[in-house]
Image (cartoon, helix red, strand yellow):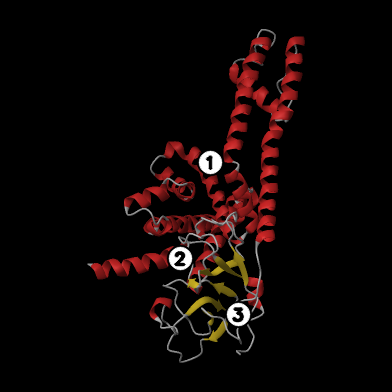
Amino acid sequence: MEEKNSSWDKTRKKLFAMVSTGVVDSRLNQAYDIISTLALIANLVAAFAVTFDNVRAQYGPLLYWVDEITVAFFAFDYVLRILTAEEQYPGYKGAAAVKKYVTSGFGIIDLLSFLPHYLPAFFPAGAAVFRMLRVVRIFRLFRINAYSDSLTLIGNVIKGKKTQLLASVFIITMLILASSLCMYSVEHDAQPDVFKNAFSAIWWATSTLLTVGYGDIYPITVLGQILGIIITFLGVGLVAIPTGIISAGFIEEYQKAKRLADIEQEQDVRFIKVSIDEGDEWIGKTISEIAVPSGSIIALIIRGGDTVVPRGDTEILLGDKLIMCAESPSEGMLEDVKEIILHARHPWNGQKIKDIDISRQTFIVLVDRGGKMIMPDGELVLRENDKVLLYTKESIRKYQHEPLF
């Protein structure tokens, strides 16, 4: 039973690495990312193309099968994510991990990306509503933010300013409700067919406060027009609040990055590069299965055009170039590694590696804690006086085709 559990644990980790966007430590994982992105793009293109009569008449069957195949892929992806929920949420086990994923934002988006496609077969009366829900699948595009620091920055800003944004939305909502009731009271008698009820007034208040002003409904009484002017002025000021909050968030993120640059200390650290050639006994073995020299650590793997941060279950392949570090760097090793010493006020101090704000083009390869080299993982908590060794893809590219020392 233990062997079965161990085998399933390894399989689950491999599946999780495969479905996790941005993990490219094997060709399978990289291929799955490409297929996922192409499936989503193909589905969205088909959804737009089918709305054109001439395109639908000529390519209707093709668009139908594109939709069927891509939606089936979304369902398959959802099942894999349920099976690997324990890897995504290490603090949860079994049903608790599945519940955590299913009720998460991405879990709901993943479910709605395929479920509405099949529901009309069981509930024909709700076909129109189910078709509308299919639009949710466009939010799967946010998974691509694993490749974009800009999207990550926007997400950090919104997450950091969540409370202020919710407060501003609450204030705007209250103003809309108050304005609609006031306008209904003033204009209903003069325009009973226009301001029929409070909802009609809400439509007017929303379009006015959000500075849209469609002109399909407007006050005609003097008191209503004066009230409309006051509400319009309030709307201009209040709608600017969320914009100001988001702008301030971007400025804070920039200042945070600048502080990191100001307090970090850089120096050259040297690494040994080892090439895996035909017949090497390490080929096909995982990092945890090989015996590296005492005091040495495999810090990075250069695989084709990609850079892989090795984990214990990462398999070594033919043609890999291993970047190895000894605890006491010596002559004849690679350069261009950045070392950041964490001071007491450093933003990373006390943070788990998986929670820190770091470019997706940059890798934390080692943590030097009191002279002891630690191979980092997402759960490692950084401490004051830790020396964090960073490597960037730009630094690595020049070594990809270099001869060995």
> Which of the two discs, 3 and 1, sits closer to the camera?
3
Residue type at numbered disc 2 = Ala
First in sequence, mark 1 or 2: give its number. 2
What residue is disc 1 on?
Answer: 132
Q: For the point 34% across and 49% down, which residue is it?
A: 96
> Toward which corner of the image does residue 271 lie, by quadrant?
bottom right
The quadrant of the rendering that contains the C terminus is bottom right
> Which of the two discs, 2 and 3, sits closer to the camera?
3
In the rendered view, tell whether residue 104 sits above or below residue 200.
Answer: below
Residue type at numbered disc 3 = Arg
First in sequence, mark 2 or 3: give its number. 2
The numbered disc on residue 270 is 3
Residue 281 placed where, x, y %?
42, 89
Rounded to the nearest angstrom, the CA distance separating label 1 from label 2 is 32 Å
Residue 395 placed where, x, y %?
65, 74
State the residue lying farthest toward the bottom: 279
Please tell me how crowded label 1 is: few (under 14), some (14-19), or many (20+) other residues with Cα within 10 Å: few
Q: For the point 44% across and 83% down, which residue is it?
A: 294
Residue type at numbered disc 1 = Met
For the residue pair 337 and 360, the one nearer the viewer reads as 337
For the residue pair 270 and 254, the one nearer the viewer reads as 270
Residue 340 placed where, x, y %?
61, 65
| Direction from residue 95 to residue 23 in the image, left or right | right
In the rendered view, tell whether residue 84 sits above or below residue 237.
Answer: below
- For the residues bearing labels 1 and 2, Cβ distance under 8 angstroms: no
Helix, strand or loop status at disc 3: loop
In the rendered view, tell whether residue 300 sits above or below residue 156.
Answer: below
Q: For the point 54% across and 52% down, which residue is it?
A: 140
What residue is disc 2 on?
Answer: 17
Rounded to the nearest angstrom, the CA distance separating label 3 from label 1 is 56 Å
State the residue lying farthest toward the top: 189
First in sequence, mark 3 or 1: give its number. 1
